[in-house]
Structures are given as structure tokens and as C-alpha cells.
Amino acid sequence: MKDIARRAGVSESAVSFALNGRPGVSEATRARVRRVAEQLGWRPSTAARALSGEGVATVGFVLARPADTLGVDSFFLQLVSGIQEVLAERHLGLLFQVAEDVADECAVYRRWWAEHRVDGVLVVDPRAEDPRPDLLDELGLPAVVIGGAPDVRHPGLSTVWADDAGAMASVVDELAALGHRRIVHIAGLPGLAHTQRRIATLRAEARRRGLTEVRSVTTDYSDTEGAAVTRRVLGGSPAPTALIYDNDVMAVAGLATAADLGFRVPQDVSVVSWEDSALCRMVTPRLSALSRDSAEFGRTAARELMALLDGEPARAVGVPVPRLTGRGSTGSARPA
Amino acid sequence: MKDIARRAGVSESAVSFALNGRPGVSEATRARVRRVAEQLGWRPSTAARALSGEGVATVGFVLARPADTLGVDSFFLQLVSGIQEVLAERHLGLLFQVAEDVADECAVYRRWWAEHRVDGVLVVDPRAEDPRPDLLDELGLPAVVIGGAPDVRHPGLSTVWADDAGAMASVVDELAALGHRRIVHIAGLPGLAHTQRRIATLRAEARRRGLTEVRSVTTDYSDTEGAAVTRRVLGGSPAPTALIYDNDVMAVAGLATAADLGFRVPQDVSVVSWEDSALCRMVTPRLSALSRDSAEFGRTAARELMALLDGEPARAVGVPVPRLTGRGSTGSARPA
DNA sequence: GCCAACTGCTAATGCGCTTGAGTGCACTTA
DNA sequence: TAAGTGCACTCAAGCGCATTAGCAGTTGGC
């Protein structure tokens, strides 16, 4: 900036005013300063900026899942890619961290806050008993919870949420219409808020329809558990005629397991995946799946966080309800 | 720090000395200061630290691939997870960015450099004609190239490399021993350095063995192209008896396509995936795959970057050659 | 008994930027 | 004509830390 000031023949403050679009300099000077800055390829040092109270132009994202579960799930990369797209417009950086568990994640937030490393954070995988909203409230760190339910207890946090309940209801609708009365929902991690919402909705929908043989089983999202649970429930008697998997990885694993056990899909058992991805289109039969636009989810979340950083009040916004894309893995229930 | 200084009854400089392990304070004072700092939960502001020339304790990672290709590939999340593990030990942050292409990626490096956002970067997907090493050299940004060949032209850059040539040779060995003489290698992006190394090695190995019907076809790594190429090559006459896919996603897509076309695996055609993941174990038959430890790859790269940041000279380190894990998708070639 | 060297600490400066408090000037208004 | 009012700009302080120079007090050597 000193260089720019010298070459433009003004003071450093004038340069600051000019470059930040503040009043206090004439348009002529502003243009001149801008030109010189451009010429010199100047970019403000984030460190210096941060030090004088401007924020660090960085948002944080922590992923607290065991490393090996991280592998195949297509959701997160899509989500992050969407987040980036929006952040890049304002040249905001994304500080990314993998954590062991939620406690570890909280420690990361504390550290980031103490070190002034981020202006705000994006929180994923909200849980039923979640210490994070309280912590973020306490730290005063702007945050957007991705995939949570609107949270009235933390008016400082924004929420971007998908209507899991509505989606589950529509899946049950679909399956019921095909004559399915014995349905098993192979859910994800029991502690996650959306897992619980899905389970609760399934139970409510079943009761409403008088279906008694409908249940949920929780897992860790891995292909291993997906396969194991599938083996167990299909071995029961009477076996379910429809399986709903909470992610694509388990659905595919379950499909393979069903085949191993001699179940034909969809003649003997229907399979639905709660996540659409290339994976679902790569197996035989192609998997019927709930499609949501994960990148758009990320874009929405990033936009909300930027709004928060701009001082706008927190709010809860919904993203479109995922729709069931019917493919070859769902069909009429076989008569008992 | 002012607080700490006051409570410990010393000057701010003494606090700085004490907390940074520099000489100039007695052990007693150091301990006292440390205790107070701990009590207050003090962490140095990265911004202030950076401003006084200490570096920003952050490394950058740019992923330049089209967003939709990002989805299922298991490699990157594993890699990043390994990187994190090592960086976290020193509380280094990871600034992550998705870019459109290499030109965009270069712009990101320039910006990061000008804004003093990172102390160094990790570069992935090195290319045959790659502008990045030159740029990073020019900027003087410490960097580790992941998956490149040792690069004598850029002595400032470290390289962490896998012996693709050796791995390809061992795969060809294996297939040749099973009697395969018609092999197609469904490669990844043609511009990537490792793609070219694999192609070159395959050609050399084929010549050495007098195999004339061996070739490579490049793709964009997507399941779509994997399937399309598979359809094309299996439709040729005579059809190949072995297919080597450069990633797990294409291998799985190819497997499904082969089944569609009435080819039995491995009786009619053998399939090898150059990437092992849950995906490979979820399909029927399970895919024989080259297993490498992607997380370890990341850990090694992160360690090299930290060494570079510590002022150690750049070097090239190898990671173990991936080994072929035989599963159900490879078998003896059917006699012509 | 005097200088040198060391120890344990403090004061002051600067990193690159923002910002509130001026300053000088032309121009209006009573 | 004096006072008032904007405008375009400059000055200087300060953000939180690292670092260099310096300053008492002690020890050691001769």
C-alpha cells in the first residue's frame, strides 16, 4: 500500500479509502489508485486486515467422522464443492478439518475462535444431543447448521434444512402404493438428528396406515454394516419386502447381499437409497433413489453464512424436498 | 498477552519469550507464564503472528477437477484425511479450494501468495505440461507435488510419488501369467502425468513380451465414460480378455457394462481396478484391485511439506508400490 | 578491585492495514 | 466580511504479536 500511495501521489489512508470503496476520495483519485493497485498486482494481506478488525475472510468446516467412513460417501464432496462455489465469489477461504468426534470438533472450534482463524463456521451432521450450538453461541461464532431442524433455542444460528419427514412420508406412500407392508429402514448413525427424524416419521406413517411390520435399524453408514444388517433382516421370517437405506453405499452393499442370499430385486425385495449418486446408476438393477442436489445444499448454506457475516439476522431456510427417482430396484410387493 | 503479562508480573516480551520457548527468561518465570496462559486459554492470534513474519500456520490444497467428477472418487477424501492427521499435530490449518481447471488453480496460488494466506501448498494431479511448478518456483511458495515423478527441473519442490511403472508392470505380469494376451487399459485423464506413465509402461511391457493386442484408452474418470469405453472395446473383435481401469468408479461401471453385454467376469473377461475402496468389495464379483494406502500417501506428503517449511531441502520420496489384491474379478484367460 | 561476560528482564519498533481525528481549501450564507 | 459547511485528503494511533537493542544485577577471571 505504501508503494501504491507513493506512485499515486496520495497518502496510505487515501489508498485504503479508495480501494475499499469508502467515501473520502474523489472519483478521479479512486480510479488512479485502483489502476496503480491493479498494475502492481496488489492484494490486501489478510493477516493485516484481520489484525485491524476486519475479519479473516475465512470460514471453517469440520467433518467429524471416522476416517474410514469418509471414503465413498458422495455427499460431502458435492456439498463442499457447492459451498466453495459461493464462497469463491467473495474470495472467502474455506478452512477444512477432519475431526475424530464431536468433542474433538468442539475443541477445533474453540481453537479457531481463540486464534481468530475463521469468521464463521458451517456445521454438519447435527445430533440429537448436540453440544455444538451451545458452544458456538457462547463463542459468538456465526454458524450455519446444515441439515438440522430449525432450532428455536439458538436464535443466533442459521439453519439450512431438508424436509426429511416429508421425504420419508413420500417414500412410504410410494412403497405402500406398491403393496409393501413389511418395510425395514436401514438407518445411519443413531445419534444424528436427521436419522431420528426419519425414524420417527417412518413410525408415524406406519401407524397411520396400520402397518405393524415396519421398523428401523441404525448403523454406522458403512457398507459392512449395511451388508450385515441386510443379511440379518432378510434372514428373518417373514422377510421384509422393501428396504430403505439411509445412504447410497449401504444400499449398494445391501443389494449385493440380497443377491447373495438369493433374493431377486425387485421381485422379492425392493430397495430404495436415500442418496442418489453415480453409484446408484452403476449397479444392476439401477437403484431407485431419493435425489437431492447436495451441491445446491452447500450453496444455500454458504449464502446463509455470508448473510450472517453481513450482519443479517439468523434464519432457517429449507431446501427442496428430495424426490424419489424410480429406477429398477423398486416394484410391486410379492403377495405373501 | 497483555493480560498474561500483567497477571504473571512480567513484560509482554517476557511472555513472548516464555511461550515460544526462547531463551531470555528463567525456567521459573517460563513455567509461571505458561500456567497463566493455560488458565486463560490463550492461543496466539494467527493474524498477528503472520503479520510479524511468522507464517500463517496454514497450507493450501487445490482440487482442480470438474465438480461432477468429484463425486464418488474415494481417493481424495482419504488423501485429505491423511494430510489432516499430520497437519493437526502442529495445529496447521488446511485451506481447501475447488478450482475449475489448472489455470484457475494457478490464479488461486497467486492470490493466496499475494494475500499471505498460506505458508505452502500441496499439489495434486501433476500433468505432463504443467504450469504449476514454474509458478510456485517463481512465487517461492514451498510446495509438495503429490503423485508426480521426481522433478529435477524444480529443485525447490518436493515430490511424493508412487511407482506407477512398477505397479503396472506387476499387473501385466499377473495377467500375462494367467494367459491374457489381449488387454485394454481404460486410463484416466490424458493430461495427467501418471496416466502417461502408466500408458508408457504398459506399452513397454507389452513390447517386451511380444503382446501386440494391448492398448490404452483415455477417459475423464467418470462412470459414464468408463461404461462407454467398455461397451466399445468389448464390442470389438476379437474382444480383449482383460481390462485394467484407472479408478474404482470406472471399474465398477465397466463391470456392470460387461454383464449387460453378456460377458461373464472373470470367465470371459478379467477386470482390474487401479484403486481399491469399499466400492470394489461391494460388487459381484468382488473386484481385484491395486491397493495403496491413500491416507498414508497424504501423511507422507504433509510431512514433506512440514519439512520444507522447517527449512529442510526439498527431496523426492516414494511411497510403497501398490500391490494387486486378487479377488473374484480376475481369472485365467479363455483360450481363443 | 576492575572489566568482561552472562543472566533475566524491559522498552521500543515494526509487520500492513483500518480508522477516527484533524487540516487546508473552496464555496456558501447571513 | 466573518462565520459556517463540505470535500478531499493527511496524520497518527492501534490491532497482537515477535524481535532487537538495551539495562540492571550477578558472577568470574586476573
Image (cartoon, coloured by chain):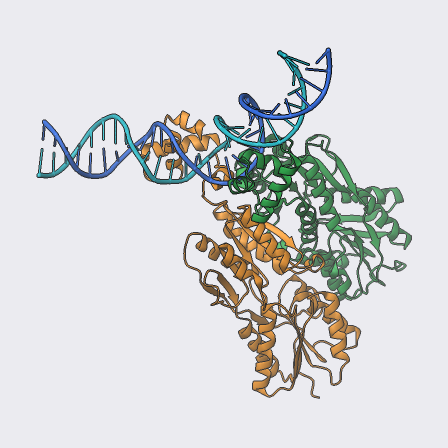
Chain colours: A orange, B green, C cyan, D blue
- State the image coordinates of residue B7 (x, y, percent, origin top left): 54, 42
Tell me: A283 left or right of A314.
right
> At 74% from the left edge and 43% from the top edge, which residue is drawn?
B300
Q: Judge whether residue B59 can be spotted in this image.
A: no
Tell me: B328 left or right of C28.
right
In this rendering, the count of numbered labels is 0
Q: Quadrant of the C terminus of chain A?
A: bottom right
Q: Judge whether residue A153 can be spotted in this image.
A: yes
- State the image coordinates of residue A292 (x, y, percent, origin top left): 56, 65
* Snapshot quadrant of residue B315: top right
- State the image coordinates of residue A269 (x, y, percent, origin top left): 70, 79
> At 71% from the left edge and 47% from the top edge, which residue is drawn?
B298
- State the image coordinates of residue B247 (x, y, percent, origin top left): 73, 53
Picture layout, residue A260 above or below residue D9 = below
Picture layout, residue A227 above or below residue A45 = below
Q: Nearer the viewer, residue D23 or A283?
A: D23
* Snapshot quadrant of residue A271: bottom right
Q: Quadrant of the N terminus of chain A?
A: top left
> At 62% from the left edge and 82% from the top edge, which residue is drawn?
A178
Q: Nearer the viewer, residue A130 or B327?
A: A130
